[in-house]
Image (tube, rainbow, N blue to C red):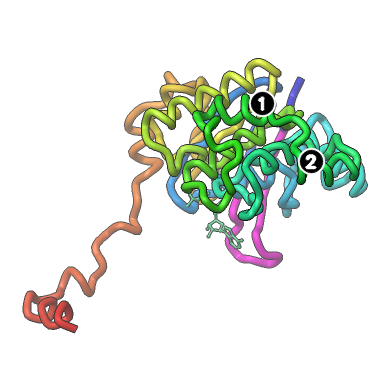
Amino acid sequence: MTTYRLEQLTVHHQAGARAPALREIDLVVAQGEQLAVIGPSGAGKTTLLHTLACAHAPAGGLFQAFGREPWALSGKARHALRAKLFLAPQTPPLPPRQRVVSAVLAARLPHWSLSQALSSLFKPVDPDAAYDALARFGLGDKLYARVDRLSGGERQRCGLARLLLSSAKVFLVDEPLSALDPALSQLTLSALQREAASRNATLICSLHQVEMARANFDRIVGLRDGRIVFDCARDDVSDAMIAALYQNEAVAPHPAQAHETPERLAIGACF
Ligand SMILES: Nc1ncnc2c1ncn2[C@@H]1O[C@H](COP(=O)(O)OP(=O)(O)OP(=O)(O)O)[C@@H](O)[C@H]1O
């Protein structure tokens, strides 16, 4: 079964914008597949994940999820399709004053009646499930902490614990390791990959940590300037391909800096 089929897909952030954020994207992803999307800042990784989550309507090309074209469906049917997709943004939108337990259990809201949802705010309905999900990301001790007292990395993992409690068939995870140290990064990635494998969910994960991507994912997609530069098995990704992907004109020295005299720099520093 195919989760996604994209052919010559173009995505703009603003109608009429000259440069598309994604262009000529061809991508086929099978159900249960796990792949990493890598590429420099601004390459279009987040835009791709949002498009796959049916949050951005493409400007052109073919976009199918589970064999259907989401943007040709009625609003209600598209909403039902979205329930199968879980987008975990880099900064999860968690209510700051909420307890972690309630924030995590909110993943089950679509399956609850209104009265269940309201009563869970006062007395969480299944704290054990929230604890188990948090513990898999090393956060069991934060069950009753307030969301606004979490560190950036804890917040991020709290968002991922939410994913475990969802019934999604597709995990779209945006830079889950950006605020984590190496040991937590490996724990987090392993927890995500195990969960995806156990429910045959598709996992598409954007990563800045190229070596983590190569070590953990069989398939690597390289994005640059909104285009797919390569899409291949990890063994076929060479160091030269990675170097070309990240080659960055933007970090060349600024002309004003290059010609700055020591005297002028010193004066500038005083002010
Ligand atoms: N809301 C927006 N409105 C207009 N342009 C946007 C918006 N969000 C992103 N862009 C532009 O779209 C392009 C792709 O951005 P995107 O966030 O998808 O890249 P990215 O690869 O995820 O970057 P990063 O690694 O820095 O998070 C960039 O040129 C960016 O400036």
Q: Nearer the viewer, mark 1 or mark 2?
A: 2
- Residue 6, picture quadrant: top right
269 lies above or below 56 = below
Number of dots carrying numbers:
2
Q: Which residue is mark 1?
A: 202
Residue 218: x percent and y percent? 51, 20
Label whose residue precedes the other's in the sequence (1 or 2): 2
Q: How far apart in space, not on screen, are marks 1 and 2 (Cα)? A: 30 Å
Q: Amino acid at mark 1?
A: Thr
Horizontal side of residue 105 vs 71, given as left or right: left
Residue 15 highlighted magenta (yes or no):
yes
Q: Please state which amino acid type lies under the numbered disc 2.
A: Ser
Q: Give the residue displayed 92% in from the left and 45% down from the top.
A: 76
In the picture as drawn, the residue positioned furthest to the left comes out as 263
For residue 120, the mark is 2
In the image, 26: left or right of 43? right
Q: SS of the residue at dot 1?
A: strand
> Where are the magenta residues, as a range?
5-22
Residue 245 shown in magenta? no
Which type of secondary structure does the marked residue at label 2 adopt? helix
